[in-house]
Image: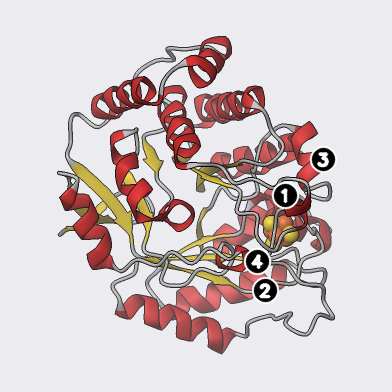
């Protein structure tokens, strides 16, 4: 992979002063170089399983969480989870993304029992638990983060999604998610996972109270972790979806398609040590997602047979495998199903 080419100051200047098309061209060149001019655009077939919406963190940007005593609070039982996995496997899915709120009562044994029951029954990768969930499980169970991760891995956790990163700058985090772990704790969980051989993705949610410097800082913090550990499989960014959130009262605008494409392109330029950049059709819709293939993205993300978190914010884009294949081909690329670790499962 190519060596670092730009610094924070240069990245900030690109974001603030460069045109959309120039950024796109730069990102596209880097994408071609990293992927040896490959025409392949990948996607994974998976399902989000949100095992609970009970969460004590109460992030101001989140429309998904519920109080424990809320009428629509839930905790899925094993049978419900198994049924969702079976439906995913029937659709040739290779991964389940298991994530939930920071439930005040769930400890390590709940997760190790759940994961080992899943792995005993099904051949599917468990891509699960964000860094804040792992920190919370460790605290709730009175054990270290390292022990928590070891036990989760031993019971079947295959990889970790990079959620809960939002913007990795504490002055932003303290405004949008004051009860969530600080950026260095997020980094600690991720680096510990990488040390134990658990691959993760990295993410960014922009479009709240951050400024351009914060976005650039986030990207460089991710790049620096990758330089140290090499454990990130991919980077995914998306914009804040305001509807039904507390933050909507103070942030009353939505990021635009141009914002998304510029930030996606900048991600491809800065994160030249992370091989894969995913687009986000779930938040941006199919047309911007297709366009993003010319702005640095080499992966269409997931089919998301089920998605609850973005849907809670009133955004309901849906896509079938055929839709994704059509959009990739229509843009002049070659679609391929991949697994969590970007191995090609089949070309379509
Ligand atoms: S974003 Fe996650 S941690 Fe924050 S309130 Fe929602 S479910 Fe809880």
Q: Secondary structure at mark 2?
A: loop
Q: Which mark is residue 100?
A: 4
Distance from Cα at disc 2 to Cα at disc 1: 21 Å
Q: Which mark is residue 145?
A: 1
Tag 3 residue: 174
x, y percent for residue 71: 78, 85
The answer to whether residue 38 is above or below residue 93 is: above
Q: Residue at x 53, y 63 (%)?
A: 315
Q: Residue at x 72, y 67 (%)?
A: 65
Q: Can the viewer see residue 15 in this picture? A: yes
Q: Residue at x 77, y 66 (%)?
A: 55
Q: Is mark 3 within 8 Å of ligand 1?
A: no
Q: Residues within 10 Å of mark 4 (few under 14, many from 20)?
A: many
Dots 4, 2 in contact, CB < 8 A: yes
Q: Can the viewer see residue 1 in this picture? A: no
Foreground mark, 3 or 2, reads 3
Dots 4, 3 in contact, CB < 8 A: no
Q: Which mark is residue 52?
A: 2
The residue lying toward the viewer, choosing from 33 and 326, is 326
């Amino acid at each position: 992979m190519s060596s670092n080419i730009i610094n924070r100051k240069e990245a900030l200047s690109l974001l603030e002063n460069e045109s959309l098309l120039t950024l796109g061209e730069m990102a596209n060149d880097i994408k071609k170089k990293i992927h040896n001019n490959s025409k392949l655009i990948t996607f994974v077939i998976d399902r989000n399983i949100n095992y609970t919406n009970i969460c004590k963190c109460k992030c101001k940007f989140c429309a998904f969480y519920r109080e424990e005593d809320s009428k629509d609070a839930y905790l899925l039982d094993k049978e419900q989870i198994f049924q969702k996995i079976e439906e995913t496997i029937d659709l040739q899915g290779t991964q389940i993304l298991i994530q939930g709120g920071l439930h005040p009562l769930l400890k390590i044994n709940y997760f190790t029992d759940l994961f080992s029951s899943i792995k005993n029954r099904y051949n599917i990768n468990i891509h699960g638990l964000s860094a804040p969930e792992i920190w919370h499980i460790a605290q709730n169970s009175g054990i270290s983060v390292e022990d928590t991760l070891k036990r989760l891995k031993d019971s079947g956790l295959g990889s970790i999604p990079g959620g809960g990163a939002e913007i990795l700058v504490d002055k932003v985090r303290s405004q949008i998610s004051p009860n969530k772990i600080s950026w260095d704790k997020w980094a600690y969980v991720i680096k510990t996972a990488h040390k134990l051989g658990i691959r993760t993705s990295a993410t960014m949610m922009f479009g709240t109270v951050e400024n351009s410097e914060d976005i650039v800082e986030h990207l460089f913090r991710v790049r620096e972790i990758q330089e140290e550990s090499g454990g990130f499989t991919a980077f995914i960014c998306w914009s804040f979806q305001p509807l039904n959130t507390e933050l909507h009262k103070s942030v009353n605008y939505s990021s635009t398609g141009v914002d998304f494409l510029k930030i996606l392109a900048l991600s491809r330029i800065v994160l030249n040590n992370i091989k894969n950049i995913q687009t986000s059709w779930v938040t941006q819709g199919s047309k911007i997602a297709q366009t993003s293939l010319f702005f640095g993205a080499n992966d269409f993300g997931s089919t998301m047979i089920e998605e609850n978190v973005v849907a809670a914010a009133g955004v309901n884009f849906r896509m079938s495998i055929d839709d994704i294949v059509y959009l990739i081909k229509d843009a002049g690329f070659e679609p391929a199903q991949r697994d969590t670790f970007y191995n090609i499962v089949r070309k379509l």
